[in-house]
Amino acid sequence: MATVTEESVRAAQKRPDRRMLTATPPAPMDLRVPAQVRKDLRDERRARRRGPMPPGNPYPSWTTTLTTFTDPLKMLLENRRRYGPVFTLRHGHELIVWAISPTANHEVLVSKADAFGWREGRFRDLWPLMGDGFFAIDGDYHRQMRRMLLPGFHADAVHGVAGDTVAEVVAAVEQLPAKGIVDINHWVRDTAMRVALRVLLGIDREDDEIHRIANAFERALAFHGYSIPTQMLRGPRTPYARTQQARAELDGHVYEEIRRRRAAGDPGRGVLGLLLQCTDGDGNPLPEHTIRDLAITVMFAGHDTTTATFTFLTYELGRHPHAREALLDELDTVLGENDPTPDQLDGRALPVLERTLDETLRRYPIAWIGPRRVLEDVELDGVMVPKGVGMFYSSWATHHLEEFYPSPMAFDPDRFLPGGQVEQLPKGSYIPFGGGSRMCLGKRFAQYELRALTAVALRRFTIDPDPADPLKMSFTPTLGPKNGLRYFVTRRD
Ligand code: HEM
């Protein structure tokens, strides 16, 4: 039996309360475009004074700018071949150092992570919508936020809500027509948003209210799909005006939920419930806007990524009948006529499904770049990078390096067979969820949800991409199919 010693009491007193936010939030950002451009150029001048930039092309280039929007993977792999794993390019006005190698990834994410900041990197673009949620915070403020939310993402917590996730997915799959043409990306987006709102955040509302919240969110997020010049337009009916309106609507829904729970004296379920039990250093409840920033971040991170992953997975299975047959065999053998139980979703019961998901996330790691600002002079894969510049690592480009993944463009789940090729790779070669202390917080939840979506949908339906609607990719802020993707769906039973 554990005894309470003076020492253990002192240790407990020293241990900061895991439900307390004592760190000071960062100062608001000045995101007016001229101010940003001036700051980026000033930072570049200072960085250049500290030492030479990594090799590359520091001049404005139409080719770089255009291919960044049309085929960034090709652009990155070509420049890596030309300049080596760490190189410099100018995107618009901004000089960016790209780091593309397992070694550099491991340094950025783990061994030299303190040399990089998120807030001043390009994640700042998400600040107007997500505020001081995860993507624009660093240091103690980030550490305490992460600690507050962690209980909602632990293995037990995710396993505990897996039944609810399956129920939401089953309800959505049963809405598909027995035979017809469906925009699967649109369908799964709607489904994943319901899961994020009901299961992750714990918002128990009727379908039409959930739909209104989801709709306001999508309209606010749509702003990031516009080109930078269009984003800069101001005035009525511009994307900026529309996003502000949608954001105000969305905030209204979130504040109403917070006030409703506080008035009822019951924090309620999900991540929102957790946050409502947290306090500041004086024991006061957290400010509404702090909870709002985290709730919106969870909505974004919690549905955009799973949506695109499922769409890409069904797209690749439609083009690779072999891989699809292997998966269907497994689903029929292991699940038979039943939907998966939470235990069957832990990654061990359905190994073919697991390999198929792993390969999908290799070919399409949705969060394909990790933008940072360099906070101190640092060596990446043997190349010095001066303090002050913007830096991106890219999981997408790393996952397509021929020396680590032979025939990198081929979709082949068997790469992930136990004892196979991928197990021999160095650290930092497979990073769809990032790594280190900022590894994706929702990784486990996303995996359960994707397994549930795939098992429930493919057990009931054959889902084939429509050859008349070829995949066109969009890259901002995450990878996804541009304008959705049409599929033929046919009920298997
Ligand atoms: C297939 C699904 C997903 C993928 C591929 C993915 C990928 C990633 C990646 C790569 C990062 C790190 C980015 C970087 O290093 O720059 C990240 C961070 C994060 N993800 Fe995910 N994610 C997924 C789903 C989710 C879900 C469902 C949630 C739920 C809330 C979530 C929440 C977060 C959060 C909060 C962070 C920031 C963590 C921190 O800064 O401490 N993600 N994700």
Image: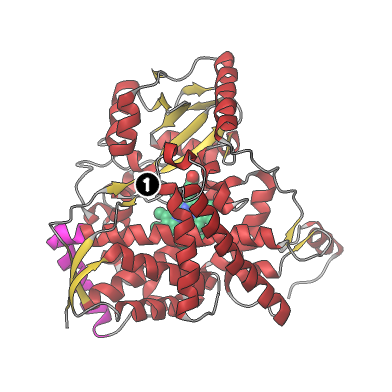
Q: Nearer the viewer, residue 352 or 229?
A: 229
The answer to whether residue 388 is visible is: no
Instruction: Give the x, y percent position of residue 475.
Output: 36, 45
Q: Residue at x 13, y 61 (%)?
A: 322
9 relative to 389 in the view: left or right? right
The quadrant of the picture occupied by the C terminus is: bottom left
Residue 36 lies in magenta, yes or no? no
Residue at the extreme front:
236
Give the quarter of the image for residue 338: bottom left
Q: Nearer the viewer, residue 191 or 87?
A: 191
Q: Nearer the viewer, residue 371 or 288?
A: 288
The answer to whether residue 188 is visible is: yes
The residue that label 1 is drawn on is 430
Task: Write the start and end of the magenta stretch as one range.
Answer: 316-337
- Chief secondary structure of the magenta portion: helix
Instruction: Give the x, y percent position of residue 14.
Output: 80, 56
